[in-house]
Image (tube, rainbow, N blue to C red):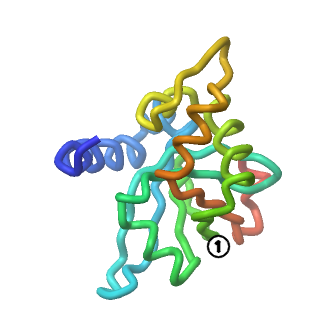
Amino acid sequence: MSSLIYKIINPLVKKLLRSPLHKLLSGNTMILGFVGAKTQRQLETPVSYHIKQAKLHCFTAKDNLWWKNIRTNGQVHLYLKGKNYTGYARVVETDYALMSAALTDFLISTPRDAGPSGVHMEAGRPDPDDVNAAIKKLVYITIEPTSDDFITRL
């Protein structure tokens, strides 16, 4: 999607996620907050997520440059299912074997992201060739929550 579309959609998604109607999206979309590496300002963006093994797993296009802020400082804030959490994010850019397996799991749980990722789904599973092509254009982000009550609340 173009950056213009994100500039229109993201504020609406963030507003919905912070509203009493957050359940419409919060099953697989959260607000990820972080500090800008250059500006030191608080920034945030909505992202799709998948929870596996007590970690959050996200993907974004490499040309969405916001992820570079968390590559430098992994401390993040999460607004997830109507609650605030903290976490530590790790960015994976080139471990393609790890990224391929993670993207496959992610798209099985969040198939609506298959199209924007350029991946076709076949019988509920992502096409492996499409996954291998897509990961070269994506960044994989894992977030380990540091809030003590994260697991008990979800």
Closest to the observer: 109 or 133?
133
Closest to the observer: 142 or 147?
142
Residue 76 locus on image (x, y percent): 54, 72
Report the side of 30 relative to 99 (left or right).
Answer: left
Report the side of 45 relative to 60 (left or right).
Answer: left
Q: Secondary structure at mark 1?
A: strand
Q: Quadrant of residue 54?
A: bottom right
The image shows residue 89, relative to residue 79, as above or below, that is below
Residue at the image point whose x is 21% and y is 42% from the top: 5
Judged from this view, the residue extending furthest toward the top is: 123
Residue 48 locus on image (x, y percent): 51, 44
Amino acid found under the numbered disc labelled 1: Tyr
Residue 16 locus on image (x, y percent): 36, 41
Residue at the image point whose x is 47% and y is 51% from the top: 137
Closest to the observer: 63 or 72?
63
Residue at the image point whose x is 58% and y is 20% from the top: 121
The residue at which mark 1 appears reads as 88
Report the side of 47 relative to 125 (left or right).
Answer: left
The image shows residue 36, relative to residue 137, as above or below, that is below
Query: Crowding at label 1, few (<14), some or many (≥20) Cα neighbours within 10 Å?
Result: some
Q: Quadrant of residue 98?
A: bottom right
